[in-house]
Image (spheres, rainbow, N blue to C red):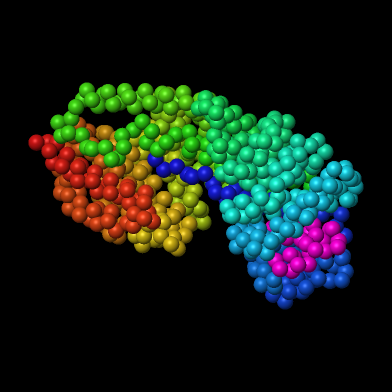
Amino acid sequence: MVKTKRASRNSLVRVSAIRAPPPTRNATSSLSSSAAVAAASTQESSAALVRQLSSSSARDRITAARTISSVLEMSAARNYLLREKLVQTVLERSLTDSDEEVVCEGFGILRSLAAEQGYEVCVFLWRKDVLASVTVYLGKIEKLLAQNIAGPERRLMYSLLENVLALTTSLGGCSDDIRTSIVSRLPDLTNVDMQLISSNTVPESTKVIAAENLYVLSDMNKEYVEKIKSSGFSFSDNCSVPVRVYLAGVQYNILETVGASSNATAAAEIDDIVATLSDCLNAVDVRDCLSVLAPNLVDGVERPPAITDEKYQAAQNNIIGVQIALELITGISESLTAPQKGGKSRSDPMPDADGDDAMEEEGKQEDSDEDMQAVDDAGEAVNTLRRLVPYMVTLLPIAELQSHALHALNNSAWTLTVLCSTENEWRTCALGLWTTMATLLRTLIDDPNSSLDNSTACIGVQWACSKTMSGKVPVQLADVRYLINAFKAKTSDHESPRSTNDPGHDMTSYVQLEFQVRTVGLLGALAQRQGRVDMTREIAVFLITQVASLPNTRSEVVIESLDALFDIFGDKAYDYDYEVFVRGGLLKHLSGCLEKVRRMAKSIDGRTQQVLRMRADDAAINLARFVQYKTEERR
C-alpha cells in the first residue's frame, strides 16, 4: 500500500501564500498594478524603491512599501528587490519607523517574502531576531484590543495584527527550532489567537489568520498543544468554514500529539473531526468562489478584482479552507489504518509446496475478523470518508483543487480498501472511481504540462480500487501497455539507481520514483485477475525485466516488482500459473536474479537507509524461498 503522507508544515503554510496581504485601508497612496510592475521591472528601479523606504517623507515610505508588496509574488521583481537588501532595510528601517502605517506595510512585506521564499528567508529573519519586533508589536496590539478603538486606527491595528500573525505562522512552519523559540518568546500567542477567534467584533479575515496560526504552530508541538488545552480550547460550530476547518485541524493536532484517554475517546474525536470537515466541504460553493476570484472583463480587458473586497476575501479563504480540509482528510485517512492490516507480512515464510487448504481458510477467516474489528475501531469516520468520495471526484476538474482532491482520494481509497473491501457499497464506488481515474490518468500523462505528482496520485487510487476488486476492473491489454510505456518514459527521465534518501535527491526525482513504484503496484494487482492470461504474461515479463535490469533499476522498484510477482504466482491453482510461469520459464529467470538482488540489498547503507535496507533484505530472503517453493510446487 502506498499512501500519501500528511503535508508538512511547510506545504501547509505555502498553500496560504495565495492569500496575499491586502493593503491597509487607510493607506495614503498607491500605484496602479501596471505602474507597480514597472517600478520594480529592473535592478535600477528596484534599488530606487528600496532606497525610498528610507525617505524622510512618511508618504513616500508608505508608497514604496505598498508598491513592493504588490509585486513580490512575481519572482523576477522579488529577486531584484532581494539583491538590494530589501529584508535588511525593512528590519532596520520599516519595523522601527515612527509611522505605524509604515510598520504595518513592513510586516506585510516580510509576510509575503516568508510565504513566497520559504525556508531561507524565514531562517534569515529568525537569525536577525525578527521575533523581537514581533514581541513588541504583539504587546502593543494586545493593549489596543483591550481599548476597543474604532475608525481608521482600528483598521490599521487589524491589518498590522494580520501581518504579524501570518509572519509568525510562516516562521513556525518552517523549522522546529524557530517554532520552539516562538513558543518560548511569545507565551501569550495562544491566548491572543483564541480570543480573536471567539470574539464577535473581530474581522473575519483576522479570525481566519489567527486560526491558521493556531493550527500550524500546534502541529506535533507538545508544549504548544498543552497550552491550547490548558486555555480551554473548545470547538465551535458558529465559526466560518475556514475557521472551522483550521480548528478541526487543531483538534486533530492535539489528538496526534498527546493522544486521548482511551481508544473509544480517540475514535469519537476522529469521527467528530471528519464529520466537521465533511460539513465544511459541503458548505462551500467552490465554483461560485472561483468566479468571484476570477479577473473581471472590462471593455475587453481582464482586470483583477479588488483584494480588499470582503466577498473576494471570503471566497479566497473558503478555497483555502477546502484545500486544508482535503489535506486533513489525507492525513486522517492514513492514520485510520496500518499498511497491510490483517494481511501476511512479507517476512513470513513461503507456504509449503503441498499447501494446506484448511490453514489457508482459517487464515482468511482471521483476516476477515481483524478487518471487521478495524472497521469497528475506525468508527463512523470510515462511513463519512466513503460518502465523501463522490464529492471529491467533483473537484478533480478544478485546477486549484485537483492535486488536493487526488491525494485525499488516494488515502481514502486505500483506507476503504483495507477496511471495507468486502462491502458492496464500497466495491460499487471503487468500480466507478476506477473508471474516472482511468480517463483522468490518460489526460494527465498525455499533457506535457500536467503535474507528475497528480498522475502518481491517480495511479495510487487505481491501485487501491484494483486491490478491492482483486483485479476485476474494466481494463484492456492496450491499457496495460499504455501504463508500461508511461513507466518507461518516466524511467528514462531519471536513469540513476540511487535511492530517495541520498543527499541531493530532489522532489522531482522522488515523484518520478513514486510514479514508477505505484505503476508497478497497479500492474501487479491487475495481473492477478484470472481469465486474462495474455495480460498476466505481459505484466509478468515487464516485472521480471525490472528485476533482471539490476543494478540499473531503482531498489524500490525492484522490491515492489518482486512483491508483485510473489502475489501473482503464489499458487499453482491460478489459471495463468502454468501458461505464464511454467511455460514461460520464469523460474529460471528469477533464479538467475537471486545474486543480483542480494548484491542490491548489501549495497544499501543500513545506517542511513534502514527501512529500505530491511525491505531489500526481506526481498532477497523471500526470493530465495519463492524459488525453492516454485521448484517443489509441481513435483
Which corner quadrant of the image does residue 418 belong to? top left
Magenta run includes residue 88: yes
Magenta run includes residue 573: no
Residue at the (48%, 33%) spot, across then down: 336
| Residue 97 vertical position relative to residue 10 in the rendered view, above or below | below
Whole-percent x, y for residue 538 in the image:
27, 46
Residue at the (19%, 31%) spot, across then down: 573
Whole-percent x, y for residue 408 in the image:
52, 40
Query: What is the count of numbered marks?
Result: 0
Q: Quadrant of the C terminus?
A: top left
Question: Is residue 325 in sight in this rendering?
Answer: no
Part of the protein shown in magenta: 87-112
* Residue 322 appears left or right of 507: right
Whole-percent x, y for residue 395 in the image:
57, 40
Whole-percent x, y for residue 589 in the image:
18, 50
**Residue toward you, 540 or 50:** 50
Q: Main secondary structure of the magenta part?
A: helix
* Residue 598 appears left or right of 383: left
Question: Is residue 531 in sight in this rendering?
Answer: yes
| Residue 309 vertical position relative to residue 367 in the rendered view, above or below | below
Residue at the (15%, 34%) spot, across then down: 353
Q: Quadrant of the N terminus?
A: top left
